[in-house]
């Protein structure tokens, strides 16, 4: 059960067929710039786009990264036989937007499909190696299924779904109160609530870099002395980082950014090794693509305490394939994968036990 066994002929033919079509990028958020720079233009996977639009807001600029900005109504009036739309926006609420915008009769792809295809073509040996490290056939089926769904544009898939992320499942049934749970990306505290229900004796060091949500969490857990809220970014070292505290999607898109000019503020980053005191029995990370960095900053803790690890894989393509290799080769853990959403492209978690 390898990634190299997936038939990508249809997608390869689709890419060839894009030549001569009017390629429209739908979504002018933070995904757009990176997608255009890496995948569009002469000598790249996709041709130069005809235009960019966004159905959720007016765009003041006439061009974005050299691509003309088109009114959304103009895109709706284009001929489907001459047009291909690639969605460069997030997946949440996507189906409802497609239906409401009457775009379902256009050839329609998500940018993630082309990103995965390109990554597999360039790194197939590494990807096959990663799936071979998983300890059970269900994990391998889930892992490959998540990637295959993105390649094929399957937005929803009930067959891969598994309940109870991080703990309370067949891999991590009960939290170990002999050490503390380090949980990064605490957001609104729903998983902290679950942790206390799972084992009321567990001590939790919760990290949430958003000022809005960390203030909410401090109020929410003010009567729970075993829960400590840290308004800091977990990172590979102690340093100052640019943080985009994007609350447009209830804070789900808040992230560390290399673009200091467009960040919300500078924020303190800390390493688990230097900041967290005492024994750690589990580390759970949902940190918007910074998982590899945080693992680097927890090296001594992992070697000393051998905590169970729950690491989100889905934020960056590189994470899907590099994190399993890093954890297996560096620390010798037994690896499993579960998918905790009916949406194909989110909530895929690596378990290291």
Image (tube, grey):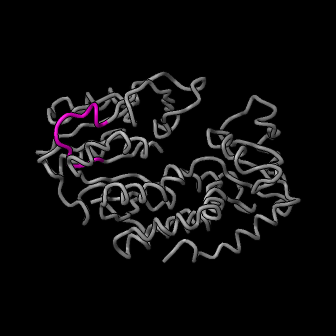
- The picture places residue 232, in percent across and down from the top left corner, at 35, 29
Q: Within the magenta stretch, is there residue 279?
A: yes
What residue is drawn where x is 58% and y is 73%? Answer: 4
Left or right of residue 253, residue 88 in this image: right
Give the position of the C terminus as an image quadrant. Answer: bottom left
Residue at x-position 77% and y-position 30%: 61
Q: Nearer the viewer, residue 208 or 76?
A: 208
Q: Which residues are magenta?
A: 272-283
Of residues 260 and 165, which is closer to you in this image? 260
Q: Position of residue 66 (x, y in %)?
A: 81, 37
Quarter where residue 67 is shown = top right
Q: Judge by depth and name the residue closer to the eye, 338 or 258.
A: 258
- Is residue 120 placed above or below 23 in the rendered structure? below
Magenta-colored stretch includes residue 348? no
At x 30%, y 40%, the residue is 189
Report the residue that reaches farthest toward the right: 20
User: Total of numbered circles in the picture?
Assistant: 0
Apparent side of residue 149 relative to residue 337 in the rendered image (left or right): right
Q: In the figure, is residue 65 to the left or right of 327?
A: right
Q: Going by the image, does 226 lie left or right of 315?
A: left
Q: State which quadrant residue 112 falls in.
A: bottom right
Q: Position of residue 165 (x, y in %)?
A: 32, 56
């Amino acid at each position: 059960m390898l990634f190299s066994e997936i038939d990508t002929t249809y997608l390869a033919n689709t890419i060839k067929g894009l030549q001569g079509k009017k390629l429209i990028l739908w979504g002018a958020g933070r995904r757009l710039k990176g997608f255009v720079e890496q995948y569009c233009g002469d000598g790249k996977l996709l041709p130069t786009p005809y235009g960019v639009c966004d159905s959720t807001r007016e765009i003041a600029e006439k061009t974005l990264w050299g691509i003309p900005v088109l009114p959304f109504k103009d895109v709706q009036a284009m001929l489907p036989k001459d047009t291909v739309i690639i969605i460069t926006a997030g997946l949440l609420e996507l189906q409802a937007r497609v239906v409401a915008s009457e775009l379902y009769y256009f050839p329609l792809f998500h940018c993630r499909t082309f990103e995965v295809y390109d990554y597999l073509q360039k790194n197939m040996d590494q990807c096959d190696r990663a799936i071979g490290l998983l300890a059970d056939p269900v994990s391998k089926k889930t892992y490959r299924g998540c990637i295959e769904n993105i390649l094929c544009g399957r937005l929803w898939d009930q067959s891969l779904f598994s309940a109870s992320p991080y703990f309370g499942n067949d891999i991590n049934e009960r939290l170990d109160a002999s050490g503390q749970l380090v949980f990064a990306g605490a957001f609104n505290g729903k998983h902290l609530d679950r942790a206390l229900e799972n084992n009321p004796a567990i001590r939790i060091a919760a990290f949430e870099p958003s000022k809005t949500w960390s203030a909410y969490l401090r109020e929410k857990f003010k009567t729970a002395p075993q829960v400590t809220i840290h308004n800091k970014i977990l990172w590979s070292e102690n340093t100052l980082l640019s943080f985009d505290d994007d609350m447009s999607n209830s804070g789900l898109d808040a992230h560390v950014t290399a673009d200091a000019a467009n960040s919300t503020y500078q924020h303190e980053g800390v390493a688990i090794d230097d900041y967290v005191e005492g024994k750690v029995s589990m580390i759970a990370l949902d940190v918007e693509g910074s998982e590899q960095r945080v693992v680097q900053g927890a090296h001594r803790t992992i070697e000393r305490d051998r905590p169970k690890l729950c690491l989100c894989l889905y934020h960056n393509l590189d994470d899907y394939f590099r994190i399993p290799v890093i954890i297996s080769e560096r620390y010798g853990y037994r690896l499993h994968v579960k998918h905790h959403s009916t949406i194909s492209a989110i909530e895929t978690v690596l378990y290291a036990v």
